[in-house]
């Protein structure tokens, strides 16, 4: 649409930028909020319809022009390397390596530079994945426990970082001096799907749930089923059932230029439902640091 770019989302944590999908206009949307492509270390793709990946060749060239030489990890359903290779016909020379990870299981978990990532399959007319991103947070270091064990101060830091230590012929473990894991942060992203129990399970307890709302018009419920998409109200039910803190609706049909008229009814199902828009951002902090 004239004032609406195609699909993409960026997460930024501890110097590592993570991009989900790369629809046409992603470069422009990033530059409008003052973000550079240089720090994109990983790209996650939900599927390979054009509105989710057509901006990739230009993005790859923009990253190259930023001076990046470090590898980039790309993750997506089977066929990712073939699809990217085809798109790279117009971006053949890059100063960095692309590393591919192709998904095949119903659910896959992996970690990358502080992100704990869950890829989960959803219900669309092609193989499609949603993603949950979690930032885990260790428990607090128990100084009194360390002192009671007689551990010198120079051994505290390795234990805090998860390493075992040897002292006076004994082995000490992080669990002996670390409290229970504290609440971290979680964002779940899902578009192009019918509602599923798997989405609700993956999104459970998310601080933010970004979800497709293809149709706001109640009379288009049948069309949503036919095209393997969902309505605002179906997304709101999933957000409620998953116990998320907040939901942003996105991926609107071009036939719906303004979704605001439907939000009163949507919020009667899930009060913390909001419309997404280009450049919409949110900064999350760990609960104790607010």
Image: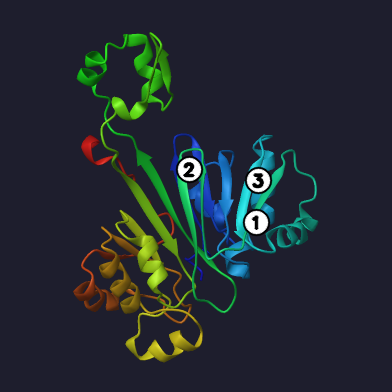
Q: Position of residue 231 (x, y in %)?
A: 37, 79
Image quadrant where residue 76 sits: bottom right
N-terminal of the pair, mark 3 or mark 2, is 2
Identify the residue at horizontal 37%, vertical 18% (top origin).
Answer: 157
Please give the residue where the numbered disc 1 appears in the rendered image: 56
Q: Residues within 10 Å of mark 2 (few under 14, many from 20)?
A: few
Determine whether, in the image, residue 62 is placed left or right of residue 246: right
Eye-nearest disc, 2 or 1: 1
Using the image, tell me which numbered label, if any, was put on residue 34.
2
N-terminal of the pair, mark 2 or mark 1, is 2
Please give the residue where the numbered disc 3 appears in the rendered image: 62
Determine whether, in the image, residue 83 is placed left or right of residue 109: right
Image quadrant where residue 167 sits: top left
Residue in front for this viewpoint, 103 or 254: 103
Residue in front for this viewpoint, 199 or 214: 199
Q: Secondary structure at mark 2?
A: loop
Q: CA distance from mark 3 to mark 2?
A: 14 Å
Q: Position of residue 106 (x, y in %)?
A: 53, 66
Residue 276 in sight in this render: no
Determine whether, in the image, residue 128 is placed left or right of residue 211: right
N-terminal of the pair, mark 3 or mark 1, is 1
Q: CA distance from mark 2 to mark 1?
A: 19 Å
Q: Secondary structure at mark 3?
A: helix
Determine whether, in the image, residue 80 is placed left or right of residue 276: right
Marks 2/1 in contact by CB < 8 Å: the verdict is: no
Q: Residues within 10 Å of mark 1 (few under 14, many from 20)?
A: many
Q: CA distance from mark 3 to mark 1?
A: 10 Å
């Amino acid at each position: 649409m004239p004032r609406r770019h195609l699909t993409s989302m960026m997460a930024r944590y501890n110097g590592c930028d993570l991009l989900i999908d790369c629809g046409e206009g992603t470069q422009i949307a990033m530059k409008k909020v003052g973000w550079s492509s240089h720090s994109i270390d990983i790209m996650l793709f939900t599927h390979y319809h054009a509105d989710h990946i057509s901006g990739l060749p230009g993005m790859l060239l923009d990253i190259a022009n930023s001076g990046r030489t470090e590898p980039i990890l790309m993750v997506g359903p089977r066929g990712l390397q073939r699809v990217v290779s085809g798109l790279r016909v117009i971006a053949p020379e890059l100063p960095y390596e692309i590393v591919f990870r192709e998904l095949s299981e119903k659910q896959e978990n992996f970690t990358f530079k502080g992100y704990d990532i869950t890829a989960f399959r959803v219900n669309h007319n092609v193989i499609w994945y949603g993603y949950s991103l979690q930032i885990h947070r260790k428990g607090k270091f128990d100084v009194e426990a360390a002192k009671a064990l007689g551990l010198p101060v120079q051994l505290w830091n390795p234990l805090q970082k998860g390493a075992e230590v040897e002292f006076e012929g004994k082995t000490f473990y992080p669990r002996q001096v670390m409290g229970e894991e504290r609440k971290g942060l979680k964002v779940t992203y899902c578009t192009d799907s019918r509602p599923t129990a798997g989405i609700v399970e993956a999104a459970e307890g998310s601080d933010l749930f970004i979800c497709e709302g293809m149709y706001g018009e109640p009379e288009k419920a049948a069309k949503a089923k036919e095209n393997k998409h969902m309505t605002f109200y179906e997304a709101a039910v999933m957000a409620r059932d998953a116990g998320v803190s907040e939901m942003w609706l996105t991926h609107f049909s071009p036939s719906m230029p303004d979704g605001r008229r439907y939000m009163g009814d949507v919020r009667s199902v899930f009060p913390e439902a909001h419309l997404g828009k280009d450049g919409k951002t949110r900064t999350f902090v760990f609960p104790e640091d607010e």
